Amino acid sequence: MSMLTRELPSHVVCRGEKYEIETDFRAWIEFYGRAREGDIPGMLKVYRRLPPSLEEALELAARFGSGGALPYGRERKSGRPILDYETDAPLIYAAFMGEYGIDLCEARLHWYKFCALLSGIGEGQALPRIMALRAMDPAEQADSGRRKELRRLQRLYACPDRRSSEERDADAIAILEKFY
């Protein structure tokens, strides 16, 4: 589907029946925050009326959300996110205001439009520069001073680690296993 040639979707189809779905970007930022927390009832708030199957409802919502192209924020090689909607909210707001003159506190914007505009924010804004910094691999820096400075800046601008303790432990074990 091309957003330039077709009307943006406002529903999903389950078993041949249409189910209206919330399209505003705020609902989808909340959807992905709830998904990260494992809050299934909270995720389902995007529906005005639920499809008959919980599994299908979640699958269709995730498919709708991914149609916007930027669900959680792209991740760097380490698996850590380079965009966090909650932490980066002031930067996102400033970027939309500066780049497009859109006040996100007042705008009603379809999730797909929001994602397209977010993707198009220019390097003149702080948000894409910070995302690029988060995505960089310090190991690719030849100079040890630059590696150290990059690590310092990545700690300063890091997205919060929202993984569970089990996920952090599993990642630590995986890293240790590389050395043994």
Image (cartoon, helix red, strand yellow):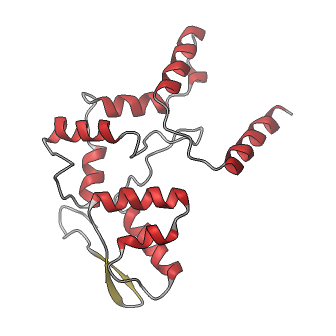
Give the number of marks: 0
- Where's residue 176, x and y in %? 79, 35
Residue 29 or residue 135, whichever sits in front:
29
Q: Which corner quadrant of the image does residue 98 belong to?
A: top left
Residue at image coords 33%, 34%: 127
- The foreground one among 5 and 60 is 60
Residue 4 relative to residue 157: left or right: left
- Residue at 56% from the left image edge and 46% from the top image edge: 162
Q: Vertically, is 171 above or below 12? A: above
Name the residue located 50 percent from the left edge and 26 percent from the top edge. 154
Q: Quadrant of the N terminus?
A: bottom left
Q: Position of residue 77 (x, y in %)?
A: 57, 38
**Front residue of 77 and 85:** 85
**In the shown orientation, is residue 60 left or right of residue 103?**
right
Q: Is residue 69 above or below residue 2?
A: above
**Going 19% across and 69% down the picture, which residue do you hit?**
6
Q: Quadrant of the C terminus?
A: top right
x, y (%) of residue 123? 28, 29
Q: Residue furthest left?
A: 101
The answer to whether 19 is drawn above or below residue 125 in the figure is below
Position of 58 with respect to 99 (left or right) is right
